[in-house]
Each structure stands twice: as structure tokens, then as C-alpha cells.
Amino acid sequence: MTGYYPRVARGAHSYPLDESVPESDRLGLGVVGLNEGRTALLAALRTSRVRPVAGCDVSEDALRAVERDLPGIHYTTAYAELLADPAVDIVGIYTPDQLHGPQIVEAFEAGKDVVCTKPVVNSVDHAKAVLEASRRTGRKLLVGQSIRFFESMRRQRAAFERGEVGELEVVETHYTHRMDWYYDGRPWIAEKSDWVYLGMSHPLDLLRWYLGPIDRVSAVGSRSSLARSAGTTSFDVYSVNATTADGRIGRAFGHYGMHELPRARNSIECMLYGSEGTSLAKYHDMHYLHTGADGVEVLEDLLYEYRHFHFNNEVHGMHYGEFANYLQYFAEAIVRGDAYSPGLEEGLETFALMEGVRRSAQAGGAPVEIAPIVAALGIG
């Protein structure tokens, strides 16, 4: 099954296939939702701890398309059949947001651990149900926050944890991307979701990852021409100011109907301002910029070295590398009993942040405290 990926590619990190763990000892991955989930099944081939064993989608065409790339595993249109498969240890959920909550609960009750793409859930009721099921069954969940597992972001985080920027003072994040293609393939988006859960889940997660729990937010929003033409009910432009209890500041911005100018701005960027230095991580260009020890600006350009592993030499924006990284990370945590992040409660705290942003924007920028939303979910 490893024939899909070329074995030879430039660079030590291009395809770090590790076959030291026997296939029989690897955790079986079953994925529901084979649009984005196709990438997760194929990315599992790049890990040493996970093997693809099953795929599920309501579309027979989607099943057959993935089967051409990945023959020899179990395919079904019935989610219950995937959950009943004893070869499935981890369920990957990549379905429309409004389905996540019930599907997570069903997976937990079937004795499976879960990787669920962000934002985990998009309603308070689903958040409560998922948390209750996790506590009742003892099953684990990793939030598929892919941006944390992109190489430039990983390097920025490692440097931050080494103390290279000093005391963190301000975090600025954005995710800007024209989403006409997204509307075309996902008709449920216009009426059944909100871009605060779709696109803003990336920059808001980055804020919380670095700043910790957010105390309050003030947000404004608007609808782009693209959103209006698609009949979207939510804002697709958001500007967010956030503060922590100790007074540190975060800013997040998202625009999902814009015309892109990638030389000026990458799709996702995370800027850290600290007492000892500044750093910037970019996606898709895979650039990591930071102040050096002598104050000189340093650019680490990782794209040529990591292009194959992360993008499979396809469109920059494919998620093979991030998915492989977080599948390996989660499987190792399960096997070793290690702590991992972002887990379910952290993911739901980020959901509470997104919900606070949504409420603030709907109220024209009125400040919203996040702690009461977190408490209402039953966390703490």
C-alpha cells in the first residue's frame, strides 16, 4: 500500500518512511468524510504508528476515487459499519461541521479514539454531548488543528518554548483565503455554518495556543461580495481583539472572500512579539523568520526541503505533512500514555473563544467574556 508515494525525493525530510514498527502493531485508522479525509488516509502511510484500514463516505463516487489511490482497505457508505470494524482503533472525522458532535459520540461509544478536524463542534449542545461522552467512556480525542503541525509553525513553537522570544507580549494571527471553491463543493456552508468556526478556527487557536485562556474578546464582522452572492448567512470577514487576564493582547483577522495577494501576505501567518525577540511563521510558503541573537533578521526557508512531505509536490495547501505529523503524534501518545495537545477540553475552550467572537460580532463589537461560555460547557 505504500506505492502511492515515491520513495525517492530530495532531502532527509521529504519522505521519512519508518517501517521499524510492524504493521500489525500500528493503530488502524478509519476515516469518515473522504473529501478532506482522503488526505488523512494517504498521510497515514507516512507514519510508523498508524495504518489506513477503512474509509467511509455517503458518496460511492468518493469511495471509488479514494480506492483507486488506496486499494485493499475496507470501504463503506455506512458509518455504523466502519465503527463495527475491529481493525479500526482511531476514527478520523472530516465530515461537515454539524455532523461532528453526533459522530464523535458514536465513535466514543464504539470504543474508538478520535481525530476530528477543527472546529470539533459548532454548537453548545454538541460540545456538552461530546464532553459527557468522553468522560463516560474514557476515550481520547485529538483536535486536527493542522496548522500547529506545519513545519514553519513547529519551528516557531519550539523556539518559543526554548525562551527565544522571552516573555510573550502580543500575538497577531490571520487566515485570509478566497473560498469560492469551498462554496462550490460544500452547499451546507452557506446556511449551516459560520466562518468563525470554519476559517477563524485557525488564527483563534493560534492565539489561545500562545496566550493561554482568553479573558475577553471584542470582534466586528462583515460579509464580502462573495459571501453575499453565495447566500451566506454568517460574516466571512472578522477582526478580533482579545485580552488575557494578565493584560496581554492578541489580534486575529480573517477574510474568506478576498482576492489573494500571496507575495504580500501568506494565507496564514502567526507573529509573536516578546521581550527578547520577534518571530513570524508563514503558511503556505513555509518561511520562519526571527530575530537572531545579534539582532539580525534570520529567514529559514523550509519549502524546498519539505515540499514533498507536506504537499506531495501537489498544490501548496495540501495537508499530507500536517496530517501525518498529527497522526503520528496522537498514536504515540496513545501507545505511551503521554499527554497531548490539543485534546478535547482544550478544543472546546477554543470553541468557546470562537463562540464569544461570534456573539461579539453579532452585537457590533460589544466585549464578551469567555469564562462563562467555558463554564456553560461543563469544563473546569
Image (spheres, rainbow, N blue to C red):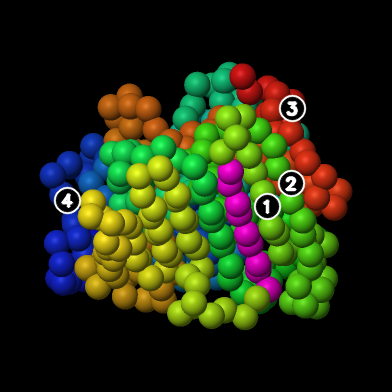
Residue 255 part of the magenta segment: yes
The residue labelled by disc 3 is: 372
- Label ID, residue 18: 4
Of callouts 4 and 3, which one flags the residue occurring earlier in the amino acid sequence?
Answer: 4
Q: What range is drawn magenta here?
A: 249-257
Q: Amino acid at mark 4?
A: Asp
Q: Residue at x 66, y 33 (%)?
A: 215
Do tag 1 and tag 2 residues touch (Cβ < 8 Å)? yes
Residue 155, position as x, y percentages in the image: 31, 52
Of callouts 3 and 1, which one flags the residue occurring earlier in the amino acid sequence?
Answer: 1
Q: Amino acid at mark 3?
A: Pro
| Res. 122 in view | no
Circle 4 packing at 10 Å, graded few (<14), some (14-19), many (20+), is few
Of callouts 2 and 3, which one flags the residue occurring earlier in the amino acid sequence?
Answer: 2
In this rendering, position of residue 316 left or right of residue 237: left
Q: Amino acid at mark 1?
A: Val
| Res. 378 in view | yes
18 up-or-down from 299: above or below: above
Q: Amino acid at mark 2?
A: Ser
